[in-house]
Amino acid sequence: MTDRRIDTVVVGAGHSGLAMSHTLAARGIDHVILERGEVAHSWRTERWDSLTLLTPNWQSRLPGHAYDGDDPDGFMAVPEVIDFITGYAGTISAPLETATTVTAVSPTGDGYRVKTDQGAWKCRALVLASGACNRPSVPAFSRAVPASVDQFTPMSYRNPDQLAPGGVLVVGASATGLQLAYEIQRSGRQVTLAVGEHVRMPRLYRGRDIQWWMDASGLLDERYDEVDDIVRARNLPSPQLVGTPTRITLDLNALTDIGVRLVGRIAGVNGDRAQLSGSLRNVCNLADLKLGRLLDTFDEWAVDNGIDAEVDPPERPARTRVEDSPPLALGLGSEICSIVWATGYRPDFSWLDLPVMDPRGRFRHDGGVADLPGVYLLGMPFLRRRKSSFIHGAEDDARDLGAHLAGYLDATARVA
C-alpha cells in the first residue's frame, strides 16, 4: 500500500486533538486525525462508572464550542463528556480516521512516517495528542502482593461490585483515590486509604466554586515559563475535588467521618504485609499549610479587585484529623483483600521511534514544542498553562502550538 501524504498528522481524537484540528483548519492546514478507537475512546473504555468531571459545566468549552445546557454549575458524567466531545467532532467536521492504531513513527528526509494498522502516512508535522493517561502508574513492588489479593487500577475498576468481600486498600489520596475510597466505603466495605503527597482543595470557597476562584484570579492562566520549577509543577497530584449535584467538599476529614481509615503511603510489600510510611501527619500538615496559602491568595485578590464585599466572608476548613499512632503495616489477605492503585497515570510513547525522550523516559519539549523540528505535544499537565490538563485548557494551548506549527510549515516550504 502506498503511503499517503499530508501536511500534518494529529494522533488522538480526544478533546486536545480535536481542538488542534479546529486550529489547523482555521489556518487552512491539511491534516488528518488518527484515532485507535472512536472519538473520546479513553472516556468510553477506561473510566469508572460514577466518574464526573472535576470542573463545572460552565468551564466545558473548546474552540468554537461550549456547554449550553441548563445546569452550568453541574458536573458532566462520563456519557455526557462523550457526547460533548463527539458532538464537537461533528460540529467542526474533523478529518477523522478512527479504528486506526499508530504502531510506529519514524523520521524521513522531509518529515515523518506514521505507520498504522491501516497503512502509513507521510507528513511534515506531527501533533501528539494521545493523552497523559494511557497507562496506570503502579509501583513495581505491586508484583510482590500475594495472589490472594485482587488488584485494580482506575482503568480496570468500574464499581464496588467487582471487589471481593473484605477490607479494601486504596493507594493514593488525590482526586481519584478520594472518590474511589468514598464510593467503596459507602458500598459497605471497610476502606483504608494510604495517603501520600496531596493537594487539598474545597469545592466551594466564600460561596463560589473553587474553579471560579482559580479562573477569575488568573491562576489557571499561569504559564509554564512563569514558575520556578516546571518539572515539579507538572508532577503535582490532582486536587482533591469531586463533582456532585450538592457540590460537597471531599477531603480526608470527610472520609474519616464515614469510617475510612487513614494510613501513611505504602512503602513496600514484605510477604503478606504492606509496609507503611510514618509520614502521614507531616504530609497532611503540609497540605493544610498549602491550602491556607492558596485561600490567602484568593482573599487578597478579592480585596484588590473590589469584590471582597460581594462574596461570603473568608473561612478556613478544620485541620486534617490524623489518629495518634497510625499503623505502619497492614495484613494482605487478612485485613486487606483488594487493592486499588490510585497512584496516577503516565503517557505511552512506546510507538515513537524518535529521539525525543530523555534518560528518565520523559518527553523533551518546551511548552509542547518538541526537541525535534515539526513535532508537537498536546494535552499534558501544565503543558503551557496551569489549566492545560482541563478540557477548557486545550484552546489556548492549541492556538499557541498551531501558530508555531504553521510557521514551521511555511519556513520549510520556503526552503524546499
Image (tube, rainbow, N blue to C red):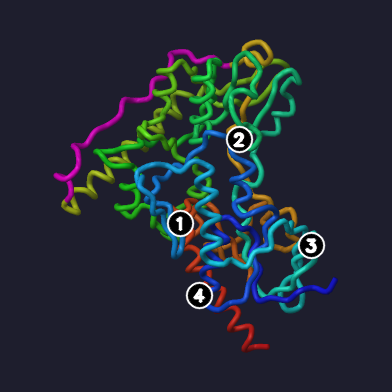
User: Magenta part of the protein: which range?
Assistant: 307-328
Q: Which of marks 3 and 1 is nearer the N terminus?
A: 3
**81 left or right of 161 in image:** left
Count of numbered badges drawn on the protein? 4
Measuring 66% from the left and 43% from the top, which residue is drawn there? 135
Within 10 angstroms of label 3, few (less than 14), some, or many (20 or more) residues? some
Amino acid type, label 4: Ala
**Residue picked out by circle 2:** 154
Q: Which of marks 3 and 1 is in front?
A: 3
Vertical side of 131 occupied by 246: above or below: above
Residue denoted by label 4? 26
In the depicted view, which residue is nearer to us: 40 or 381? 40
Residue 51 position in % (x across, y down): 52, 37
Q: How far apart are marks 3 and 4 (CA)?
A: 27 Å
**Who comes first in sequence, dot 2 or dot 4?**
4
Which residue is identified by label 1?
A: 393
- Disc 2 versus disc 3: nearer the observer: 3
Q: Where is residue 9 in the image (x, y as percent from the top left)?
A: 66, 68
Q: In this view, does 4 lie to the left or right of 92?
A: right
Identify residue for label 3: 118
Residue 371 visible in this rendered orientation of the protein: no
Residue type indicated by callout 3: Gln
Callout 2 crowding tier (Cα within 10 Å): few <14, some 14–19, many ≥20:
some
